[in-house]
Image (spheres, helix red, strand yellow):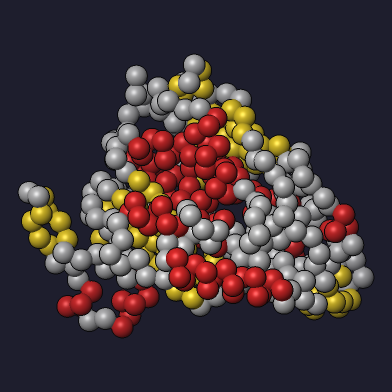
Amino acid sequence: MIGNTFGFMFRATTWGESHGKAVGCIVDGCPAGLELSEEDVQRELDRRKPGGRLASPRKEKDRVRILSGVFEGRTLGTPISMIVENVDVNSKPYEEIKDLFRPGHADFTYWAKFGIRDWRGGGRASARETVGRVMAGAIAKKILERFGVKVFGYTKEIAGISCDVSGMDAEEIIRKAESNPVRCPDEEKAKLMEEAILKARGEGDSVGGIAEIVVKNPPAGLGEPVFLKLDAYLAFAVMSVPAVKGVEIGAGFRVAEMRGSENNDPLVIRDGRIRFASNNAGGILGGISNGEDIVIRAAIKPTPSISKPQRTVNYRTMREETIVIKGRHDPCIVPRAIPVLEAMVALVIVDCMMMQGLIPRSFV
């Protein structure tokens, strides 16, 4: 179906519902000869899975099985099919509200589009769908490793509490971000973010924030004029992630306050190459990468599933009612969204590198 497949030359199709038997992904276009194991994919899934005091208590091991496309530890160049079974499913809290549209969710819009919806945990509109994206992204990251390109992300802001990574290199940001449950490299701000999340949850509410994703060492020349510009493609990919409501690249919305003399990045010679003295462009000019780090920020809304009473409509009776949502939900989506956002960015970069002819069909 339209909308379930992403990419042009490197394509990922995700499938499955939140409370169905399983979720999964099919990746087509992966070069042959890439070393790939279930452990490679599992590492990324472990970063996304629920659990911990700041996340949903749903206990999913998210153990991946590769069903096709890999033989003796290497990809065959054929479609790679991967599956993760849903083992900790509890649909009972949703039975009580199955005729009520949850505010902030896609319940109404899925019903309006299809005339039917899976009310168990949101079905296809659930963030559970992102398991497939992370599996595909794990393969994309493995490909990028061969070319010295790294995609990483961290929490920039939660509940209005913002961090500053000035003076930190990529390795320090990654190490510090992965050392705490909010994925913030600023240890002091991370504690304040944790407190804000726990406070919101204690009040039956939720909070949102901003995630920053960086592509380190990308080649120049990625992106296609005019309608498949790299920044447009990245925005499309990032905006497809559940709960993302805004995207910035480089200086982003701050450019509206700048003069041209401030916003323009001067060109310089560094290590015998043409480079840029600053990076307000976020690594992209005219829709094409310029070789500097690609910097993307995503604004993520508060989790819509909250326990506070809310107004809604019963579509069976066509009457207004009050809804109280029970079940297992994250009070803040931002930390768990980061591996998903990294995956989508990695898919775009691999796809564009293939279009540019930088990635062969086989590594053999």
Determine whether, in the image, residue 16 is placed left or right of residue 250.
right
On the image, the x and y values in percent for residue 151 come to 39, 49
In which quadrant of the rendered view does residue 202 lie?
bottom right
The residue drawn where x is 16% and y is 64% is 277
In which quadrant of the rendered view does residue 232 lie?
bottom left
Considering every residue shown, the one lying at the far right of the view is 317
Above or below, comparing residue 75 to residue 182 in the picture = above
Q: Quadrant of the C terminus?
A: top left
Determine whether, in the image, residue 116 is placed left or right of residue 140.
right
Residue situated in front as seen by the camera: 54 or 294: 54
The residue drawn where x is 72% and y is 55% is 57
The residue drawn where x is 17% and y is 78% is 261
Above or below, comparing residue 127 to residue 67 in the picture = below
On the image, the x and y values in percent for residue 363 come to 34, 24
Q: Quadrant of the N terminus?
A: top right
Determine whether, in the image, residue 204 is placed left or right of residue 287.
right
On the image, the x and y values in percent for residue 32 come to 41, 23
Residue 354 visible in image: no
Above or below, comparing residue 238 to residue 193 in the picture = above
In which quadrant of the rendered view does residue 288 lie?
bottom left
Determine whether, in the image, residue 327 is placed left or right of residue 109.
right
Residue 220 visible in image: yes
Marks counted in the figure total 0
On the image, the x and y values in percent for residue 344 come to 47, 49
The residue drawn where x is 37% and y is 70% is 164
